[in-house]
Image: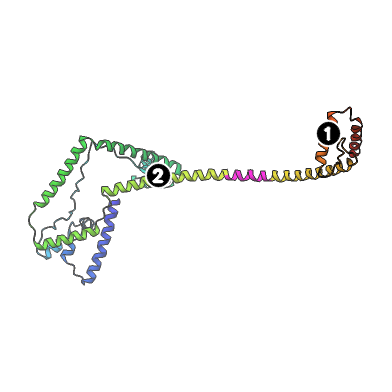
Amino acid sequence: MLYYSVQVELYAIYQLIMHRVLSSSRGHCSIAFISQVPPVVTEVMDEQTGSPGANTENNGQRNGDEKPRRGSWTKGRKRKKPMKDSNAPKAPLTGYVRFMNDRREQLRAERPDVPFPEITRMLGNEWSKLPPEEKQRYLDEAERDKERYMRELEKYQKTEAYKHFTRKVQEKQKGKRHRGDGGHQVSNEALHEKDGEGKDRAVFDIPIFTEEFLNHSKAREAEMRQLRKTNMEYEERNAALQKHVESMRGAVERLEGDVMQERGRNGLLHQHLETLRQALTSSFSSLPLPGSGETPSLDTIDSYMKKLHSIIVSNPQEHENLINTVRDVVNRLDR
């Protein structure tokens, strides 16, 4: 289908060029221009008109030469397939092909009345709507299969079978060139026409099926799959980190609330401590310490109470009067 689409596009381009040439030459088109049409376009024209090589034959009759144009692709002629290496490793399957192989028979069993092209279209729609997780499974299998193929191909290229196949391909290409060189001599006019044909072929030459392009396309597809896989991994990590950040924000908010509560409690305790210091300073201001005669103040009340406690604990029997006085002061504080 893709090849036929390319043919139709080329035929549309050819019709546009023909229309412009016919308009510029007032309805007269030269034989040389028609002979420069690529074989692919000629084949499509033959299929559309139902008469193989119709334009070429008509122009040949006008010029008295009924010989078919050299290099044209006549209808019914089969294209030669390239040589296949039976010893080469099995080519890898893409993720889409693996998905089609898994689903095709199942879908045909469910819908036996649906034709094959419709099944292919339905499978294409299913593949485009497939969840990323399931699609990634097929892509991973295809990537592993490709790695397998590259390993086997690397080993195979070192074998004698591969070297023998390469020599056969080169000999076949040399034979084609030799047959081309052994043809009859053409006139100067035909050579000029052939040169012009080559130039026009270069305009319509679209090398989308060359081995280099296919390898480049496969490498790009593998790179895109790897990038999509990496992107999905980063998205999953970002989602996990986002949840972690949200939970940390909630924990920080709770801790900030606890800190505010503790600050309020600390303020109340500090206020109560200052009130207690003032009361102790006022109550013990008339009670000097034995030996030093020190009396308390707001700045020294803490050290005063420590010294008073050590004096009482060190020798309670000797300071019974001091202990009784301290009890009276404390009792007054409780009231």
Q: Is residue 87 magenta?
A: no
State the residue lying farthest toward the left: 184
Residue 309, disc: 1
Q: Secondary structure at mark 2?
A: helix
Residue 119: give x, y in percent of width and height: 37, 45
How crowded is the residue under tag 1: few (<14 C-alpha within 10 Å), some, or many (20+)?
few
Q: Secondary structure at mark 1?
A: helix
From this view, report whether residue 262 is shown above or below residue 72: above
Q: Is residue 311 left or right of residue 122?
A: right
Instruction: Name the amino acid, label 2.
Output: Gln
- Between disc 2 and disc 1, the foreground one is 1
Separation of residues labelled 2 and 1 (CA atoms): 78 Å
Location of residue 133 (image quadrant): top left
How crowded is the residue under tag 2: few (<14 C-alpha within 10 Å), some, or many (20+)?
some
Q: Which residues are magenta?
A: 245-256
Q: Is residue 255 magenta?
A: yes
| Depth check, front residue: 320 or 207 | 320
Q: Which residue is mark 2?
A: 226
| Depth check, front residue: 226 or 190 | 226
Query: What main secondary structure does the magenta stretch of the protein show?
Result: helix
Residue at 19% across, 39% down: 165
State the residue lying farthest toward the top: 317
